[in-house]
Amino acid sequence: MKFQLTLAAVLAGLATSAVAAPPSGEQVFKQRCTVCHSVQPAPGKMGPPLAGVVGRKAGTAPGYAYSNAMKASGITWTPDQLDVFVKAPGKTVPGTKMLLGAPNPEERAAVIQYLGTLKK
């Protein structure tokens, strides 16, 4: 009987314990992206500034020396296009300066949603 009560208490605690929420897009951006990118309009960092990136034509943010491949890509940064690029930058735009992608789809989605809130 004592064991059953203890087990019931443990199970009840598990059922009511809070599940850790996934990190926000801003948190993921700060953890993974701010080494190279800024959310300030310019001058940016090693990578181009990402304020206002959603809806912008690739290779056009002022103050950043884009690769010829990026300037010639013809990409407009929609959420879907950002997802494809951030997943595999060198595969999407061979010759891009961006070397590291983000394989986790939930993190990419969170960051892209966050970037969509940033205006220049």
Image: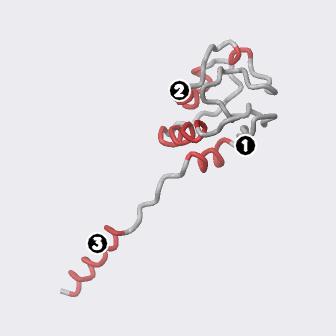
Q: Position of residue 80 (x, y in %)?
A: 50, 27
> Relative to 72, does residue 96 appear above or below in the rendering?
below
Report the side of 26 relative to 48 (left or right): left
Q: Are marks 1 and 3 in contact (CB under 8 Å)?
A: no
Q: Amino acid at mark 3?
A: Leu
Q: Quadrant of the N terminus?
A: bottom left
Relative height, residue 96 to residue 25 (above, below):
above
What residue is rendered at 68% in x and 34% in y? 50
- Which mark sits nearer the N-terminus, 3 or 2? 3
Q: Bin the neighbour count of mark 3 within 10 Å (Cα to Cα): few under 14, some 14-19, many 20 and up.
A: few
Disc 2 is placed on an element classified as helix
Q: Secondary structure at mark 3?
A: helix
* Residue 93: numbered disc: none
Task: Indicate the amino acid at tag 1.
Answer: Val
In the displayed structure, would residue 117 be above or below residue 66? Answer: below
Image disc number at residue 84: 2
* Viewer-closest of 58 and 66: 58
For the residue pair 3 and 64, the one nearer the viewer reads as 64
> Residue 47 at x, y = what percent?
74, 32
**Residue positioned 47% across, 56% down in the render:** 21
Residue position for label 3: 11
Q: How many marks?
A: 3
Residue that badge 1 annotates:
35
**Callout 2 environment at 10 Å: few (<14), some (14 to 19), or many (20+)?**
some
How far apart are the two marked residues, 1 and 3, measured between alpha carbons? 43 Å
Query: How far is the residue under mark 3 from the one under mark 2?
Result: 42 Å
